[in-house]
Amino acid sequence: MTRFALTVEYDGRPFMGWQRQAHGPSVQQALEEAAQAITGEAVQVHAAGRTDAGVHALAMRAHCDIAKPIAPFRLMEALNARLRPNPVAVLGCAVVADDWHARFSCLGRAYEYRIVNRRAPLTFEKGLAWQVPQPLDTAAMAEGAAQLVGRHDFTTFRSAHCQADSPVRTLDRLDVIREGDLVVIEAAARSFLHHQVRSMVGCLALVGMGRWTPGDLADALVAADRTRLGLNAPPDGLFFTGATYPVSG
Amino acid sequence: MTRFALTVEYDGRPFMGWQRQAHGPSVQQALEEAAQAITGEAVQVHAAGRTDAGVHALAMRAHCDIAKPIAPFRLMEALNARLRPNPVAVLGCAVVADDWHARFSCLGRAYEYRIVNRRAPLTFEKGLAWQVPQPLDTAAMAEGAAQLVGRHDFTTFRSAHCQADSPVRTLDRLDVIREGDLVVIEAAARSFLHHQVRSMVGCLALVGMGRWTPGDLADALVAADRTRLGLNAPPDGLFFTGATYPVSG
C-alpha cells in the first residue's frame, strides 16, 4: 500500500458536506468513487476537517491508501478526469509516510469567511458568500475578534451536535479584513469546535451592525452558554483554506 | 420622463448575451421586464456595450427613461427585487440629463479577461475563467501585448459579424497580470471591435504557450487578415469592468 496526500478544492454548494451521508452527495463519496474507478480498490479518503453542507474548500488536505502502483501525478490526473462533472479538483498529490494522517497529524487549520456587505443581491457569489445589507463597522468587528483570540472555553460558539471532548480551544488568529464590499474574516487554530467559525462570524456581524458592542461579545464568550449565541452565520461564506503539518506531505 | 443611469453586475452564464434575442434569455430582457413590472411602462434599457453569450459584467453602464415618479434608490431596490432569481444586480442608480446616453456618451470601455493557468479542472470558476493547462510565460505575453497597444487596423482580431464601419481602433491599455494561478489581461479603449478582446487574448495565450513569438503576434496584426488569427479565447473569462463618461452619471 502507498499513502497519498491530496490537496483538494471544492465548491460545497451541491454537497451535503465532506462526510459520506446516506441521504445525499458528499465530497468524500465523490473522491472515493473516483479512486475506486481508477484502482478497482475500495479506497477510503480521510480529510483534515469535515466541512458541513454548503461549506467550501480552497485547499482541503486528505489522504488515502492505494495498493495498485501508480505515480502521484498520474493519480491526480486520473482523479480529476473521474471527478467531472463534480465541482471537486485535486490540486496536489504526493506520496507520504504510512503514519502521515490528514486529520491526526494536522497541527493547524485555517478558514476564511466571506461577507459581501452591500444591498444588491449576489450574482457570481451566490452560495459563496453571506450577503449583509447593513453597513458593517469592521473596526468594531476587529475589536470584538481580538477578544476571542487565545485559549478559551468556546461553549457559546459550539453546535449542540459537536462531538469534541472539550469545549476549550486556542484560537491563534481571527482577522477582519475589508476590501471594498468584501469583508473577509480569517481564522486559524489547531482545531475548531463544530460551527465555531460560523458562530464567531455571526456574532462579529452583530458587532459590525452595532447591535452588539465588542464587550457584549466578550460577555457572551465568558458566559460559556450556547443560549448566549447571537447569530450563527450561514454556511455559504465559509471556506477551508489550509492545514499545516509537521513535515511537508 | 426621467433618465436613470444604471450600474449593473451580471453573471453571463445563463444568458444569450446582453441584447434581446428571440431564441433565449438576455440581460436586457431581464432588466426591461423588471422595469416594466415596476412602472407599467414599456421601458427600453440601453447599455455601454453589448456583451456576447456567456460574457459577464462587473459594472456595465446602462440607461432607461421612466415616466412614473420614482426615487433612484427606490428604483434600484425594486429592480433588484424583481430581477430575482436572475444573476443580475443593479449596483447603482442615478438621475442623469436627458441627453446622457450609456452607449453614445461613453468615452472609454474596460474589460478584463481571466485565465486560470493550471492542470486541475475549474470548480468555483467554471464558466467564469478560461482554464489553460500549459504553463504560460506571462513576460512573453506582456511583450506581445505591448505590440497591440496604440492605433491600429485590428481586422485580424475582428469577428466576421462585426458591424463597425472601420477596423481601426486605439487600444489604450493591454496589461498582463499574474497572481498565482490566475492570469488577468486588462484591456481599455474608447471602443472595441466585435470579438476583439477574446481574439487578442487567444493570440496572447499562444505566445504564453510558446507556440507564437511576440513577433508572430505583431506580424498577425500588421497582416490585417482574419485568417491570420491564431485562436479566439472562449467567452467564459471575459468581464466588462467599466465605462467612463465626460460627466459622472
Image (tube, coloured by chain):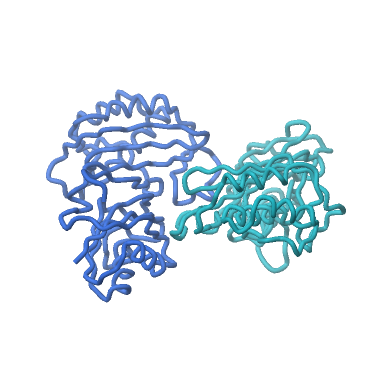
Chain colours: A blue, B cyan
Residue A59: % across, % down:
35, 50
Q: Please, is residue A139 above or below residue B51 in the view?
A: above
The extreme left residue here reads A165
Quarter holding residue A76: bottom left
Q: Nearer the viewer, residue A107 or A28?
A: A107
Q: Nearer the viewer, residue A52 or B114?
A: B114
Whether residue B42 is visible to the viewer of this picture, yes or no, is no
Q: Is residue B96 above or below residue B124?
A: above
Extreme residue in the right direction = B165
Locate residue B184, reporting x and y percent.
57, 46
- Residue B200 at least partly seen: yes
Single out the residue that lies furthest toward the bottom: A40
Residue B134: x, y in percent?
Answer: 51, 58
Looking at the image, which residue is at 37% across and 46% down? A238
Q: Position of residue A30 (x, y in %)?
A: 33, 66
Quarter-of-image position of residue B227: bottom right
